[in-house]
Image (spheres, rainbow, N blue to C red):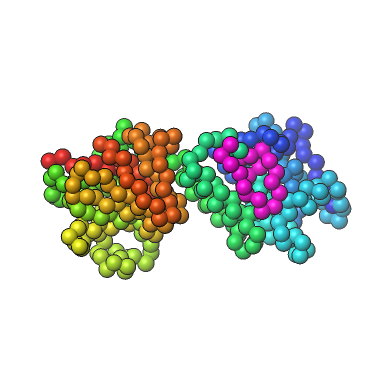
Amino acid sequence: MSLSESPSGYYKVFQEDQRLSTEDAINFIESVIRYIDKCSITYAEIPHSLSAISRNQEGDIHIAVYAEDEQDLRYIEEEVMMAPPEAQTNPFWRQNCNRMTYLVTQLFLALLTGKNSGPTSVNFSAQDLLTSHSLRELAAIQRFLKKGMAVDPASRFQSFVTFIRYLEELRQELFSSNITAKNLPKLSRRLLYPDSAPVDKRSYVVHIWTPKFEKAAKIVLTAPAILLIGRKTKNDNRQNSDTNKTLTDMSEDITPIYHGQESKDDAAHHTVLVEGDPCLSRWHLRIDFPEDLAQQLLCKDLGSTHGVVIYLDSDCSHNNCQNIGSGQTAELPGLTEQYLQLGNTYLRIRIATP
């Protein structure tokens, strides 16, 4: 098979030891997928090779393709090194879309690290990347890479539509706006929860929101209280089958956050379910609000996938935060305004003033 030549002015996208920022790498991968979608070429015509992908100074993409019934040795060595495991047993391995999503994932990793790691290897360190990320963000990148380069073809992205959806979720997790005290009033200017709840020296005010909505939900907790936060599923249908609590719609069909409350063991148990945040686990976080305001709030990860970010200042800086996950527990630092991040969902906690 012979390869079509790249047009004049194009250069190889992947260059050893040259890295892109994470955001630039995501944007470029999207451009590659758009190019593949609009071209009238079959997957089998595309070499499993990073060297076959080139671009020009204007950002236009070109991918070399095999011509029928001819052979070219230039890419054979790279294909042998990079091909997915099924290439050893399936003569038609190039024809599958999950082979292409595998290749694009390999390209994503190579652009991030400046290294061609070969098949199935997704290991990298924070120092390998041009962009600084928190431990939680690094784990999210690795989860994405592991899925895209899974040994089992059935465990990979099965289409570019699915790939793009997961890539957008990754982008949101890495680069969604950090919501701070400075811009929170815009989000909560129309509070959705009535202010009829009692406010006294033993009460806390919690705002809950996601960046894509301008309105924050507000609940007032009278201590002692327990707050459980998770992701709303289709099976809830306004009735939480796990706890048999009726969920109150706080969203007015705009902000999809639902709240339920019951008294149990001399404490108020509050359940908040957020709809539409794919990075939020079914049951993500528990916060214990003590009756004694001198005691610290206790935060427990409930075995979530993406963990919890506890910001240690009101600027919500990822350079000054604590990450917990896998069922870990931590005391909140006792700030006047305490911010937490769960996936793409944010919380602000304050002691209520009479």
Asked if residue 110 lies in the magenta stretch, the reply is: yes
Q: Position of residue 329 (x, y in %)?
A: 36, 51
Farthest residue to the front: give it. 295
Left or right of 155 in this view: 52 = right
Which span of residues is magenta-colored? 108-127
Residue name at image x 78 percent, y 52 percent: 80
- Vertical relation: 338 (above or below) 219: above
Residue name at image x 73 percent, y 54 percent: 83
Q: Nearer the viewer, residue 29 or 90?
A: 90
- Vertical relation: 234 (above or below) 206: below
Residue 43 image-quadrant placement? bottom right
Residue name at image x 58 percent, y 55 percent: 147
Left or right of 69 in this view: 273 = left
Q: Nearer the viewer, residue 251 or 291?
A: 291
Can the viewer see residue 148 in this picture? Answer: yes
Left or right of 240 in this view: 304 = right
Total label count? Answer: 0
Q: Position of residue 226 (x, y in %)?
A: 25, 55
- Vertical relation: 335 (above or below) 302: above
Residue name at image x 33 percent, y 50 percent: 299
Asked if residue 172 lies in the magenta stretch, the reply is: no
Q: Nearer the viewer, residue 20 or 127?
A: 127
Q: Position of residue 70 (x, y in %)?
A: 87, 53
Q: Position of residue 323 (x, y in %)?
A: 42, 45
Q: Quadrant of the C terminus?
A: top left
Can the viewer see residue 277 in this picture? Answer: no
- Vertical relation: 127 (above or below) 94: above
Q: Main secondary structure of the magenta part?
A: loop
